[in-house]
Image (cartoon, rainbow, N blue to C red):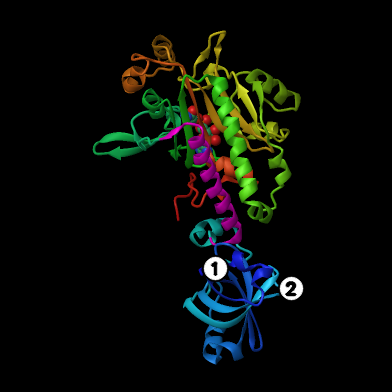
């Protein structure tokens, strides 16, 4: 049987012979004994290698190789309270598969060094825990959408227009013409609801964000959805269900990893429906009351959001933003057209915006007049405009920044820890 370390860390295995494969996590020699702490994808276990059991040749080889050497071994499990995970292997056979010498990463390395060596740092127990949480978040996103009648779909990465404003577009040469990397699948998802009604996609989005904050990447993972016949409140309901579903999935399935990261799980367990809905106007009043330097009409930057959401224990929906600070596609509130029927979801504990969404303009005249106000040429968006000519319907959607969600759930101090290979203004490798 192909056993993993996690499986054999159990009283059931005491006295049983097991075969394990993995990498040397720690190693120390005491005379004729070498203590190897072996790691695999699941956990670590101490392995005791005695010269008399494995022979002088193998013992010498094992003594020479360094941490991160890969090997397979065989031996009996016994209980050992002094071992890091409570059990150890009394090794009878060891076979070094891929030796490693002078592994560059040791304890005292700087953050920059670890980022330059991310291809090796992904092996760390910390990254292993984060990457497992990340995998569960992606699983849960797909499960949620599939359980709630959304069809998965795909949108192109090469596009010709901005969704979220021209300032953060990445231009790419495209056979003598210009193309851009997509900022959001939203407009394509809007086309697809006329066929599938409820759609979602999980894909990278690209932003040439010059802002160097702890929550901006130039390439991030975006889970976006769009639904026909939905209004702002319908979309918010699906979103809060989704967020609660994802958090429960991680809390249930990733206990060990959350504990390893020292995440305060009680704060996650505390997240339940419904989330508070707060108008932008009220949020500004609240921000002012706690001393944030902001006035009505200002957009919230990373610092303001941090100051505000430090005070939150649960996510909060902020609605009715002034239309001047939101992209053209948001539907103005018929009762007060100076604000739009949109929502941002702000995560608590200082994490800030994780979702942007809202109701879309579905009337042709309204869309054209908003485009004119913003100085956009409708020809550039002919296919988007077409949707308002042929059987338009009210609809709404949202985009969730998956890396930001992971950052919050795992309690990380920077978004670069939430993704295997972060892309920022200064980093495109490894
Ligand atoms: O608020 P944003 O810009 O909204 C849109 O792109 C909409 N078109 C989405 C939609 O309605 N379909 O981006 C949505 C979310 C943000 O709330 C944030 O979580 C994440 O995407 N995001 C980023 N994450 C990391 N790095 C960046 N540079 C991000 N920009 C946005
Ligand atoms: Mg936003």
Residue at x 51% of width, y 42% of height: 217
Mark 1 or mark 2, whichever is nearer to me: 1
Position in image of residue 55 (x %, y %):
55, 90
Graded by Cα atoms within 10 Å as few (under 14), some (14 to 19) or many (20 or more), the crowding at tag 2 reads few
Position in image of residue 308 (x %, y %):
69, 31
Foreground residue, 210 or 246? 246
For the image, the number of numbered tags is 2
Mark closer to the chain start, 1 or 2: 1
> In the image, is residue 284 above or below residue 127?
above
Which residue is under mark 2? 82
Span shown in magenta: 123-152
Residue 426 left/right relative to 82: left
> In the image, is residue 326 above or below residue 63?
above
Which residue is under mark 1? 3
| Residue 142 is inside the magenta segment | yes
Residue at x 63% of width, y 65% of height: 107
Position in image of residue 76 (x %, y %):
62, 78
Q: Quadrant of residue 382?
A: top left
Residue 65 left/right relative to 389: right
**Does label 1 point to a residue whose CB lies under 8 Å from ligand 1?**
no
Give me the disc on residue 372.
none
Residue at x 64% of width, y 19% of height: 279
- Regarding mark 2 in the picture, which secondary structure is present there? loop
Residue at x 72% of width, y 74% of height: 80
Graded by Cα atoms within 10 Å as few (under 14), some (14 to 19) or many (20 or more), the crowding at tag 1 reads few
Position in image of residue 375 (x %, y %):
40, 17
| Residue 318 is inside the magenta segment | no
Q: Main secondary structure of the magenta part?
A: helix
Residue 78 visible here: yes
Measure the C-alpha gap from mark 1 to mark 2. Answer: 23 Å
Residue 377 visible here: no
């Amino acid at each position: 049987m192909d056993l993993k370390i996690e499986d054999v860390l159990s009283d059931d295995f005491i006295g049983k012979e097991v075969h394990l494969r993995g990498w040397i996590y720690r190693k120390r020699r005491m005379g004729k004994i070498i203590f190897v702490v072996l790691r695999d994808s699941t956990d670590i276990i101490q392995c005791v290698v005695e010269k008399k059991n494995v022979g002088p040749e193998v013992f010498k080889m094992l003594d020479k190789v360094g941490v991160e050497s890969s090997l397979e071994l065989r031996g009996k499990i016994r209980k050992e309270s002094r071992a890091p995970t409570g059990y150890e292997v009394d090794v009878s056979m060891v076979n070094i598969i891929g030796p490693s010498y002078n592994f560059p990463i040791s304890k005292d390395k700087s953050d920059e060094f670890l980022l330059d060596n991310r291809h090796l740092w992904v092996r760390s127990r910390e990254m292993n825990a984060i990457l497992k949480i990340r995998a569960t978040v992606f699983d849960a996103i797909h499960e949620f959408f599939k359980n709630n009648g959304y069809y998965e779909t795909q949108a192109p990465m090469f596009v010709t227009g901005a969704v979220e404003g021209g300032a953060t577009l990445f231009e790419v040469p495209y056979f003598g013409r210009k193309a851009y990397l997509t900022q959001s699948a939203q407009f394509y998802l809007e086309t697809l609801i006329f066929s599938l009604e409820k759609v979602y996609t999980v894909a990278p989005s690209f932003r040439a964000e010059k802002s160097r904050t702890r929550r901006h990447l130039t390439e991030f993972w975006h889970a976006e959805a769009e639904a026909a016949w939905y209004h702002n409140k319908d979309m918010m309901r699906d979103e809060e269900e989704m967020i609660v579903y994802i958090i429960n999935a991680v809390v249930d399935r990733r206990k060990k990893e959350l504990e390893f990261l020292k995440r305060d799980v009680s704060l996650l367990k505390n997240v339940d429906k419904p989330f508070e809905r707060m108008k932008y106007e009220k949020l500004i009043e609240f921000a002012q009351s706690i001393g944030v330097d902001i006035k009505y009409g200002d957009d919230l930057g990373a610092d303001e959001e941090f100051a505000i959401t430090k005070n939150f224990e649960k996510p909060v929906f902020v609605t009715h933003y002034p239309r001047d600070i939101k992209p053209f596609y948001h539907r103005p509130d018929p009762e007060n057209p100076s604000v739009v029927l949109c929502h941002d979801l702000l995560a608590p504990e200082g994490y800030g915006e994780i979702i942007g969404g809202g109701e879309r303009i579905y009337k042709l005249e309204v869309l054209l007049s908003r485009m004119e106000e913003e100085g956009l040429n409708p020809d550039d968006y002919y296919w988007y405009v077409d949707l308002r000519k042929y059987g338009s319907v009210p609809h709404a959607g949202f985009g969730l920044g998956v890396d930001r969600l992971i950052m919050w759930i795992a309690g990380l101090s920077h978004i670069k820890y939430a993704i295997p290979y972060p892309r920022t203004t200064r980093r495109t490798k490894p």
